[in-house]
């Protein structure tokens, strides 16, 4: 019990403080509108009336936590998951693009890393451009990319996945290059004394020792992938997905809807990262790299 | 068709050249030449494919058209750069990173806070914070202040997590040594803690450069004055002036690379002792 | 490459003809998200009007960063809905957009201002902040300002322009004295937010004499040379206009059909029904054929837009009555 408190205690206390801050901020931010509304009907609000009003506005500047929780409950548990008003359905749309893009990004990242580790020319010519590629604001040009991909006949899930891929391959390349170079000279020499072919030393030495690096990058990659999918949905006509909910919420000033989509995305991101963490622990344990 | 053939031949020639250069002596000149040649190759491929397949400039303009537009609209590009990069991204970057740095130092003294904040910080760092952009525009208005706020939030947590991790990087023997010297808290922070944390801090600073620029640009999509890189990109797409859009993207890429490069240079100067900087 | 695609298309067309009566595919790109602004098309789809004409229609919703002109240039759609100023501007950029039908007779665009910001007439605009939509929608505003002789670069005596997001928040938060609204949409968001019509002053572009034509159907001129495409468009326009007229008669039902088709699940019944009844007022005056007088007025207003006119020369061949005549007679 004390051990549990040792880890969960600080987190819970800080979350509690955050929740209180949130409530405080909600009252402060929403008060102006409540007063504005009241003054137009020539009424002065008492403090308790003011607080009550700030907690229950239909389109508050900052919705109170319980309003968001209620909205999430209504749009996940109370709606059929096939309904277009269900957040579960929208999350699934976003998740599918995220996973597809993440898979592409990982494969591309690993391939590039292998190329970079084994070819000097590639290391020297490609690596600087991999870094430059990330300074292009892909998120800002996402709509254009989607239209251009449409023009060459790629539509639906793939354009979104492409943006996810673009964001997620970068951490994988960087991590994998580090990881594949992690074995030290002694270990590589050992392989050579056994006259192991390049392929063997890749499969038996380089790849296994890159695993911790790979998983660390995958955790960053999947989070980036989710961001990519959401941003890919923002401009594409608000068809469906969490990004579309954000956009539609912003368009109609439905702040509660924006926040619930944000929280949903947060939970999704956290679960994905946790899932990779779990796979990491199992894999590394079976490889005997951690106890 | 001739365009495509030229492109492929050019590509093969450059590739062979680069392989040769990479095998030869590694002078400083070669180290810069190789990636430059690769970049030039990409541009030539792009130009030839656009011309070879006669792709409409409304979909993808050739690099030559982009360069021409870039040169002819320098004043506009500069105005947008100041609005988005200097006012929005840079101010947010400085505020966000310093706030995260100070928070990290404050948190480092309390084990309780560290254990509480780190998991939450890690969680928030993985969130699609960019989704908060419309909300922040609502709160802070249209001008650069709201873009700056988006950047602050975007860079805060990655920076915090990295700095906290860095401050824990000193090992027990070194701390003990400091204690035997009878060093005060501040002395051991400045002489041991911070220097040991520098590689992590710079890792955070470098990650945040790209985040800052992206944050500032995307935030402009949700409302802005009539200047700024994000504003220009979104309006010029609507006007089908794709060459202008790509000119802005070029500015963003140049600014981003320069920003990142500056940080990397400072890092080199500050953490010259670290294994990753040697060789 | 182009020839290959063309070849494949002709092949597909011939195959289509051979397969006898197989429905022709038409893709329609909307200008904005699914809402009652586009009710006619959704009604035609839902009520089977397209099917009766032997068409298999796909409706693609738009969004804040979707340029219909770019979509059609990329081959992502056969027909796009666009506002005439932006369509004509694209035309000057070299994209051969042709108006084949104009279901919207009147303009629904207006500038909604707060009285407490000190605005009663356009003479009060100088030194105020005005919210404007960009992305091709700024042209009517720019030509109005140039008619008023007001600079839009934020200088003394001019107006400060801000790029409005997708909502009316700048007005509610008092960040702007006026924001752009449509009679059928954003205006009601202002009202829903708690402001009353008495708190507001509205300037309709229609009343200020600077209105330009809104949602029209545009296709690529090169496609119109193909008789099979022309035939397809005739049927498309006929069915769409049938959808529009049905929607005007049955506004509530039309709004419900739109809601059914809204994949984001964000629209509300109250808002869509009200939007539909407002939209019906704008489409009521049109049978689908472009009114030449309206077209001329739009062109004039765009040409006059001061030092930075939206279009620099009178466009030629930007519209045709061929399709709407065949469809409606």
Image (tube, coloured by chain):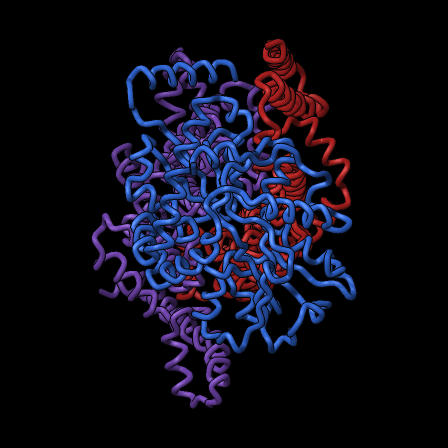
Chain colours: A purple, B red, C blue
**Identity of the residue furthest to the front in this view:** C329
Q: Report the quarter where the C terminus of chain B lies.
A: top right
Residue located 70% across and 58% down the image: C145
Image quadrant assignment for residue C203: bottom right
Image position of B269 with respect to B11: above or below: below
Residue A121 or C221: which is nearer the viewer?
A: C221
Position of residue A225 measured from the top left corner of the image (x, y, whole percent): 42, 41
Image position of B44 with respect to A127: above or below: above
Image quadrant assignment for residue B237: top right
Residue C309 or A215: which is nearer the viewer?
A: C309
Position of residue B53 measured from the top left corner of the image (x, y, whole percent): 57, 18
Image quadrant assignment for residue B186: bottom right
Image position of C61 with respect to C110: above or below: above
Residue A82 or C180: which is nearer the viewer?
A: C180
Is residue A214 left or right of C66 when viewed as pictured? left
The answer to whether any part of residue A209 appears in the image is: yes
């Amino acid at each position: 019990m004390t051990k549990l408190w040792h880890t969960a205690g600080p987190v819970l206390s800080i979350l509690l403080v955050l929740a209180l801050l949130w409530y405080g901020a909600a009252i402060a931010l929403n008060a102006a509108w409540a007063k504005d509304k009241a003054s137009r009907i020539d009424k002065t609000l008492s403090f308790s009336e003011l607080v009550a009003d700030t907690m229950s506005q239909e389109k508050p500047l900052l919705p109170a936590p319980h309003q968001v929780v209620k909205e999430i409950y209504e749009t996940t548990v109370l709606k059929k998951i096939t309904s277009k008003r269900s957040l579960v359905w929208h999350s699934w749309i976003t998740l599918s693009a995220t996973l597809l893009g993440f898979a592409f990004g990982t494969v591309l990242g690993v391939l590039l890393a292998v190329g970079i580790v084994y070819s000097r020319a590639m290391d020297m010519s490609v690596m600087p451009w991999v870094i430059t590629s990330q300074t292009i604001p892909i998120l800002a040009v996402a709509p254009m990319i989607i239209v251009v991909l449409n023009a060459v006949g790629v539509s639906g899930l793939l354009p979104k996945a492409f943006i996810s891929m673009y964001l997620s391959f970068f951490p994988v390349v960087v991590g994998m290059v580090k990881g594949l170079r992690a074995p030290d000279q002694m270990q590589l020499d050992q392989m050579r004394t056994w006259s192991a072919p390049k392929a063997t030393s890749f499969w038996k030495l380089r790849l296994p020792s890159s695993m911790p690096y790979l998983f660390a990058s995958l955790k960053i990659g999947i989070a980036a992938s989710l961001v990519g999918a959401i941003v890919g949905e923002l401009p594409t006509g608000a068809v469906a997905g969490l990004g579309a909910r954000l956009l539609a919420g912003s368009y109609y000033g439905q702040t509660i809807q924006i926040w619930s989509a944000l929280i949903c995305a947060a939970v999704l991101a956290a679960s994905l990262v946790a899932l990779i963490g779990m796979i990491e622990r199992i894999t590394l344990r079976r490889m005997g790299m951690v106890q | 068709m001739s365009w495509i053939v030229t492109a492929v031949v050019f590509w093969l020639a450059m590739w062979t050249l680069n392989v040769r250069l990479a095998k030869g002596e590694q002078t400083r000149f070669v180290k810069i030449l190789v990636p430059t040649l690769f970049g030039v190759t990409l541009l030539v491929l792009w130009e030839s494919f656009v011309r070879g397949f006669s792709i409409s400039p409304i979909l993808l303009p050739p690099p030559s058209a982009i360069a021409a537009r870039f040169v002819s609209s320098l004043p506009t590009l500069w105005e947008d750069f100041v609005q988005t990069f200097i006012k929005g991204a840079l101010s947010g970057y400085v505020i966000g990173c310093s706030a995260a740095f100070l928070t990290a130092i404050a948190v480092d003294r309390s084990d309780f806070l560290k254990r509480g904040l780190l998991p939450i910080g890690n969680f928030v760092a993985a969130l699609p914070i960019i989704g908060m952009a419309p909300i922040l525009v609502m709160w802070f208005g249209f001008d650069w202040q709201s873009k700056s706020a988006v950047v602050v939030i975007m860079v805060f947590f990655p920076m915090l997590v990295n700095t906290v991790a860095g401050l824990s990087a000193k090992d027990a023997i070194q701390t003990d040594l400091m204690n035997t010297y009878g060093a005060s808290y501040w002395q051991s922070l400045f002489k041991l803690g911070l220097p040991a944390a520098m590689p992590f801090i710079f890792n955070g600073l470098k990650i945040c450069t790209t985040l800052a620029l992206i944050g500032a640009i995307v935030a402009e999509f949700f409302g802005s004055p009539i200047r700024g890189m994000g504003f220009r990109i979104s309006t010029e797409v609507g006007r089908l002036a794709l060459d202008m859009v790509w000119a802005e993207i070029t500015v963003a890429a140049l600014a981003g690379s320069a920003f990142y490069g500056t940080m990397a240079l400072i890092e080199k100067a500050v953490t010259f002792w670290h294994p990753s900087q040697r060789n | 490459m182009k020839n290959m695609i063309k070849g494949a298309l002709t092949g597909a067309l011939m195959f289509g003809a051979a397969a006898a009566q197989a429905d022709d595919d038409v893709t329609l790109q909307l200008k904005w998200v699914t809402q009652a602004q586009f009710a006619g098309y959704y009604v035609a789809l839902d009520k089977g009007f397209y099917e009766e004409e032997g068409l298999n229609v796909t409706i693609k919703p738009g969004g804040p960063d979707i340029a219909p002109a770019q979509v059609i240039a990329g081959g992502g759609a056969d027909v796009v809905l666009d506002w005439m100023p932006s369509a004509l501007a694209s035309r000057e950029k070299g994209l051969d957009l042709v108006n084949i039908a104009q279901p919207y007779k009147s303009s629904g665009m207006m500038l909604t201002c707060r009285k407490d910001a000190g605005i009663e007439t356009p003479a009060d605009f100088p030194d105020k902040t005005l919210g404007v939509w960009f992305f091709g929608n700024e042209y009517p505003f720019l030509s109005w300002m140039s008619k008023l002789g007001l600079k839009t670069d934020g200088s003394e005596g001019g107006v400060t322009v801000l790029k409005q997001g997708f909502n009316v928040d700048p007005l509610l938060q008092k960040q702007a004295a006026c924001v752009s609204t449509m009679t059928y949409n954003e205006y009601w968001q202002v009202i829903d937010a708690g402001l009353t019509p008495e708190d507001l002053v509205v300037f309709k572009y229609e009343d200020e004499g600077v209105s330009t034509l809104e949602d029209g159907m545009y296709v690529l001129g090169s496609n119109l040379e193909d008789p099979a495409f022309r035939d397809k468009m005739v049927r498309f326009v006929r069915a769409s206009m049938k959808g529009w007229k049905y929607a005007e008669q049955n506004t509530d039902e039309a709004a419900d059909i739109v809601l059914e088709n809204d994949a984001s699940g964000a629209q509300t019944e109250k808002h869509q029904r009200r939007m539909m009844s407002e939209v019906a007022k704008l489409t009521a005056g049109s049978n689908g054929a472009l009114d030449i007088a309206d077209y001329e007025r739009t062109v004039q207003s765009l040409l006059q837009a001061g030092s930075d006119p939206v279009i620099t020369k009178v466009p030629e061949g930007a519209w045709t009555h061929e399709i709407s005549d065949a469809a409606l007679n």
